[in-house]
């Protein structure tokens, strides 16, 4: 993995990015991506430039608290099931495990 020290971002990656994000991208390790042109390593994970800008905005503007749960998925990957699992984890102390458990009787 290489640390690119170019002074300009490649092609389309420069479009629609904030100046702050462009500056950050130039300082991060970069590799060729399969879906996006390049991936950038940030806080131990690899991101496309657009996703990285969204992540930084989320980190800056979301007032997180210890009780928050962030559940994210892309479309058609079982969002309903993920919501049901989240409900089960958060409320597991409220229901005894039996044949009337909400996950066994409800499909919503």
Image (cartoon, helix red, strand yellow):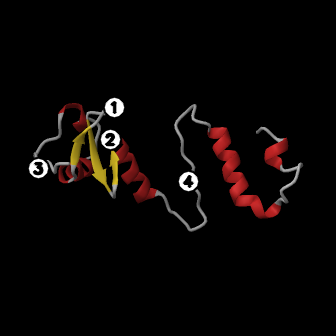
* Lower sequence index among marks 2 and 4: 2
Q: Disc count in the image?
A: 4
Q: Which residue is mark 2?
A: 48
Q: Are marks 2 and 1 in contact (CB under 8 Å)?
A: yes
Q: Residue 83 shows which numbered tag?
A: none
Would you name the residue on which mark 4 appears?
70
Q: Upstream in the sequence, badge 1 or badge 4? A: 1
Left or right: 71 as drawn, with respect to 20: right
Q: CA distance from mark 3 to mark 2?
A: 17 Å
Residue sitting at 16 percent across and 51 percent down?
A: 3
* Residue matched to label 1: 35
40 and 98: which is toward the camera: 98
Quick one: SS at disc 3? loop
SS for tag 2?
A: loop
Element class at badge 4: loop
Answer with mark 2 or mark 1, whichever residue precedes in sequence: 1
Give x and y (percent) for residue 41: 28, 51
**Is mark 2 in CB contact (under 8 Å) with mark 4?**
no
Q: CA distance from mark 1 to mark 3?
A: 23 Å
Residue named by callout 3: 5
Reply above or below: 51 against 41: above
The nearer-to-camera label among 1 and 4 is 1
Residue located farthest toward the bottom when viewing the structure as drawn: 66
How many other residues sit within 10 Å of disc 3, few (<14), some (14-19) or many (≥20)? Answer: few
Do the CB atoms of the residues marked 1 and 4 lie less than 8 Å apart?
A: no
Vertical placement of 1 versus 94: above or below?
A: above
Q: Nearer the viewer, residue 28 or 103?
A: 103
> Image quadrant of residue 35?
top left
The first of marks 3 and 2 along the sequence is 3
**Residue drawn at (57%, 68%) of the image:** 66
Q: Nearer the viewer, mark 2 or mark 1?
A: 1
Give the CA separation, mark 1 to mark 4: 25 Å
């Amino acid at each position: 993995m290489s640390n690119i020290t170019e002074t300009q971002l490649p092609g389309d990656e420069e479009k629609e990015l904030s100046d702050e994000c462009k500056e950050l991208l130039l300082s991060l390790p970069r590799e060729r991506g399969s879906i996006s042109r390049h991936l950038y390593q940030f806080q131990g994970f690899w991101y496309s430039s657009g996703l990285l800008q969204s992540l930084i905005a989320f980190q800056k503007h979301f007032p997180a608290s210890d009780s928050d749960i962030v559940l994210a998925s892309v479309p058609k990957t079982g969002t309903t099931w993920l919501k049901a699992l989240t409900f089960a984890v958060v409320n597991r102390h409220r229901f005894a495990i039996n044949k009337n458990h909400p996950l066994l009787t409800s499909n919503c």
